[in-house]
Image (cartoon, rainbow, N blue to C red):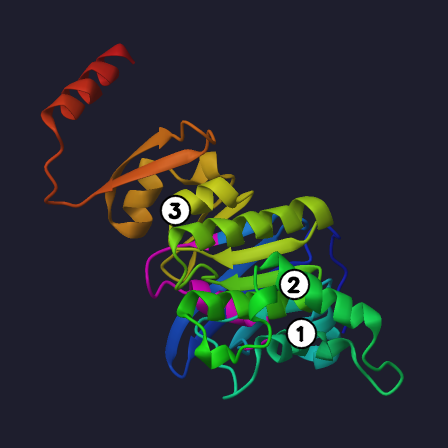
Amino acid sequence: MSITTTTEHPLESRSLTLGYEQKVIIEALNLKIPRAKVTVFVGSNGCGKSTLLKSFARVLKPQQGCVLLDGQEIQRSPTRQVAQKLSMLPQGPLAPEGLTVHQLVQQGRYPHQGLLRQWSTEDERLVEKALHDTGLTALQHQPVDSLSGGQRQRAWIAMTLAQNTDILLLDEPTTYLDLTHQIEILDLLRELNDREQKTIVMVLHDLNLACRYADHIVAIQHRNVYAQGGPEEIITEETVSAVFDLGCRIIRDPLFGSPLCIPFGKTTRIPTQTQEHDKRSEACV
């Protein structure tokens, strides 16, 4: 069943309720993902970020409501058609034993194959491009299970890129990566968005990286959206306190100008100099 929707929102949930057996994780959620933007889901562990992403990828069937992909209910769309529009990198994927990096990345092209379309030079070009972009060209003939955790994560990201869809869903894509490779992968995703106008939806735990790379942030709490909008609107001391039950100070990143979250726990002693500075700032308001 085709449902008319605006082209500016390629993914949308309507009254979406998700859960596992009797446990409800997301309830009656209405959310629109902006096209050609980087959207990041943030929230505490267990709030439903990954569950929501699975539903958007048609991995998890809604208990109620629906997800729309380009105006059509995703659960009613053919699997191959969905895979040609949308690619998903889940948490902790596992590759068959002995599969090489090149063979894994090739799997990203399978949704584009068929009886009338066999493997082509374009498929191979996209595989080689994905390997190059993720820095894996030299490792392409190595078995995936022989790689380090960070290298394996990059191999899975390469497979997702080779699928060459307009929409990329990534569940914690920086897992297992050291700081250098975290930045490299997020820079790559940002470049894909800037250059190719891909719609990217990610789950990230690091609020400061979310602020640096996101156009749109969705903060999830208590089964629904607590707040959404640009980083400057969403990542505030009030929001961090409400969503994460954590105290913090928000300052401006001196390099990127994005919000920078400096967290502290309930028992953390804030330096006296900082407290005095805060009092003087309040007195000046």
Query: Around disc 2, counting alpha carbons within 10 Å, would you say few (fewer than 14), some (14 to 19), or many (20 or more)?
Result: many
Query: Around disc 1, counting alpha carbons within 10 Å, would you say few (fewer than 14), some (14 to 19), or many (20 or more)?
Result: many
Q: Residue at x 65, y 63 (%)?
A: 130
Magenta span has 75? no
Front residue of 105 and 142: 142
Residue type, numbered disc 3: Leu
- The residue at the far front in this view is 138
The numbered dot on residue 253 is none
CA separation in Å, label 2 and label 1 = 10 Å
Q: Nearer the viewer, mark 2 or mark 3?
A: 2
Q: Considering the numbered disc 1 on the image, is that residue within a helix, a strand or a loop?
A: helix
Q: Residue at x 37, y 62 (%)?
A: 47
Residue type, numbered disc 2: Ala
Query: Around disc 3, counting alpha carbons within 10 Å, would you say few (fewer than 14), some (14 to 19), or many (20 or more)?
Result: many
Q: Is residue 90 left or right of residue 140?
A: left
271, above or below 32, in the image = above
Q: Residue at x 73, y 65 (%)?
A: 126
Residue that mark 2 sits on: 130
Mark 2 vs 1: CB contact within 8 A: yes
Q: Considering the numbered disc 3 on the image, is that residue within a helix, a strand or a loop?
A: helix
Q: Which residues are magenta?
A: 41-59
Looking at the image, is mark 3 or mark 1 earlier in the sequence?
Answer: 1
49, above or below 143, in the image = above
Looking at the image, is mark 2 or mark 3 earlier in the sequence?
Answer: 2
Which quadrant of the structure image shows residue 118?
bottom right
Residue type, numbered disc 1: Gly
Residue that mark 3 sits on: 207
CA separation in Å, label 3 and label 1 = 30 Å
Mark 3 vs 1: CB contact within 8 A: no
User: Is residue 78 visible in this depiction of the protein?
Assistant: no
Q: Considering the numbered disc 2 on the image, is that residue within a helix, a strand or a loop?
A: helix
